[in-house]
Amino acid sequence: MSPPTPTATGEAVPFLDRDHSILAFNERVLDWALRPDVPLLERLRYLCIVSSNLDEFFEVRAAPHLTAAMNGERKGSYTLQSFEALSAAAHRLVEQQYALFNDELTPAFAREGIELVSHGDRTPAQRRWVDEYFDREVRPLLVPVGLDPAHPFPQVANKSLNFIVRLGGKDAFGRENEIAIVKVPRVLPRLIRMPAKVSGGKALLVSLSSVIRAHLQDLFPGREVGQFSQFRVTRHSDLALDEDDVRNLRTALRLGLQHRHYGQAVRLEVSSGCSEFLASFLLQQFNLPAAALYRVQGPVNLVRLQQLIDLVDAPQLLFPPFKPSPPSGLLPGQSVFDQLRHGDVLIHHPFENFEPVIALLREAVNDPAVLAIRQTIYRTGAESVFVELLREAVRRGKEVMAVVELKARFDEEANINWAEQLESIGAQVVYGVVGLKTHAKMLLVTRREGKALVRYAHLSTGNYNAVTARLYTDLSYLTADPKLTADVEAVFVHLASQTRLPRLNGALMAPFHLHRKLIEKIDVIGEAAARGLPARIVVKMNALTDEQLMLALVRAGRHGARIDLIVRGACMLPARVPGLTDNIRVRSIVGRFLEHSRVFYFRAGNEEELYLSSADWMNRNMLRRIELAWPVTDPVLRQRIVDECLVAYLHDDTDAWELRADGHYEPVRNSPDSRGLSAQQALMVRYAAPAGAAPEVLWT
């Protein structure tokens, strides 16, 4: 747990540790890979997702703990003890992953005729094919490096596959340099499917690492290959720039990206059979302690096993395909602008189609009456229909402003490229505010209608990304409401001009109002509870780590407010602590789709408010990002959000986990009262209904 933080009355709140909470979330994701009722290829996908999440965890969160451990720190947030505890938890999780892969998934795949064939299990015909593949595709790209004073240990890129080899004999110059490194290019596929002629009707694959391992001797003619191991190093990769000290943020980020692959080493993965000599040699090279060494029983990069899903044709081993329905509030083939004049529209992704969001921008681009388009770009992906449409809008003479967030972690390069493409054809590109990330998701269209200029807006809890819109749960909100669209315009003007933000009509913006207003709203609920009025808070988000917001929730709960927190990932607020958080319940939903929507509901007496937002309840979102929360005032849409995003998830007893006072999560499905209810499954059923069918009630 984190050091206790006192409440206003002086009592200590034992906040949970954020990093351990992140690892606990990945344990919940791994549970999907453990479940026998999940299709086999999907179980593998969840296993790979955990590995990808762990990669990012080490790249972003591990360095302060490691540095503190190396310096022997014993006081503060990052210490030798925190490093050891975190390492122990990470090791346990990794061991679970490989045990699952080796003991359950691999035999299950074999029963389906899908096998990853090691060198020792290959037939003579298969070995000949692998030999030919190695000579043709792999060997020309490998350049082994023998280490000596003229050939120092090479720069090893972040998360790249490499081999270390201990050689016997002497080199061509009669020297006994015994260590060599083989760097494996990223362009080579990590899994290769063998052709039908040597597969006997099965889907047989070989890993690139096993292909290279079988041919290490060929890379060192005249030398004896003794000990060897594959290895992979993970490096700290969070870019840190002093934005006040750079003249051109885009140029500075480009330079930073060049060095990201070679940051501080934080984790070393090797084969389980790696000798102590080679492991110690690598730890010394990367200046890592023994606890940073991860010996694995299989490929050092489980993420790349996701390629297997695309290499085998086995739809029966996947989730049944889900086709989202058209949004209930929009009629296809009709003008989006015309329909928004009759009222706001809510779209619940991925259950409803993302296409109308694209259609709104496409209609704006093609409509001669549209004069200006403004949009934020955060994680649109390497290929983006939105950016292409903005480019087309510029070519058609419209005023286009794009707020491109260059510091979107691990999407920096894609966003830099989009910014340069838009600037090159005359779009106005701004990078937000120095020192703040622009995380709000906004699209604003200004259209001439008669003698007036009318605004239309799209706001979202998620990104302008057509791919993730099929995988993440998010809410899109389309509106022509004059007050809300005026707020959106004010935010865009503020980001471009950096002039003082005017008083907004209803939206709340970080870092100016959002944090303070949320605390005020929580306190109002607490005061209502103290007066004996009905008092309710239900919040759905991805993470809860902001101390001031957590303390406000504790205050409200102690006054008698009923509080439900649906927090997918890290949550530092312990639930159901006697005398402290008795009235606070925390649950996490991990399902087929990644929970991503943010919904804030407050009720005091007969008054209720509901906000949608791009922001999680984290200090960075509240104080170091441009975020937006906006009220949903339409009673029909508000009730729909309550039903679909709050009530349904509070009744889920299939994909839900409850947080206990000690920080551990328990699956609700293990409860004897479980009825097998899944919010996501119910929503899939609802929105897969035939057109015109009456919507079913989820649960009362």
Image (tube, helix red, strand yellow):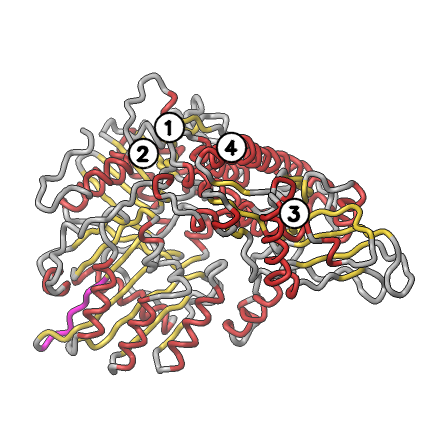
Mark-to-mark CA distance, 3 and 4: 29 Å
Tell me residue 522's x, y (percent): 33, 39
Mark-to-mark CA distance, 1 and 3: 43 Å
Q: Which residue is mark 3?
A: 267
Question: Which badge, 2 or 3, comes first in the chain's sequence?
Answer: 3
Q: Is residue 239 above or below residue 651?
A: below
Residues packed near mark 4 inside 10 Å, few (<14), some (14 to 19) or many (20 plus) = some
Dot 1: what SS?
A: helix
The amino acid pointed to by label 2 is Gly
Q: Is residue 658 above or below residue 252?
A: above
Question: As rendered, which of 191 and 386 lies closer to the eye?
Answer: 191
Q: Which residue is mark 2?
A: 526
Tell me residue 550's x, y (percent): 42, 38
Q: Which residue is mark 1?
A: 558
Q: Main secondary structure of the magenta part?
A: strand
Does residue 571 appear in the picture of this structure? no
Q: Is residue 319 above or below residue 347?
A: above
- Point out the image quarter for the N terminus: top right
Q: Residue at x 39, y 58 (%)?
A: 439
Residues packed near mark 3 inside 10 Å, few (<14), some (14 to 19) or many (20 plus) = many
Dot 2: what SS?
A: helix
Question: Which badge, 1 or 4, comes first in the chain's sequence?
Answer: 4
Residue 556 picture quarter? top left
The amino acid pointed to by label 3 is Arg
Q: Is residue 340 left or right of residue 488?
A: left
Question: As rendered, which of 262 and 109 lies closer to the eye?
Answer: 109
Question: As rendered, which of 230 and 421 lies closer to the eye?
Answer: 230
Q: Residue at x 62, y 65 (%)?
A: 259
What mark, if any, has residue 107 been given in the picture?
4
Q: Residue at x 36, y 72 (%)?
A: 496
**Mark 3 or mark 4: which is in front?**
4
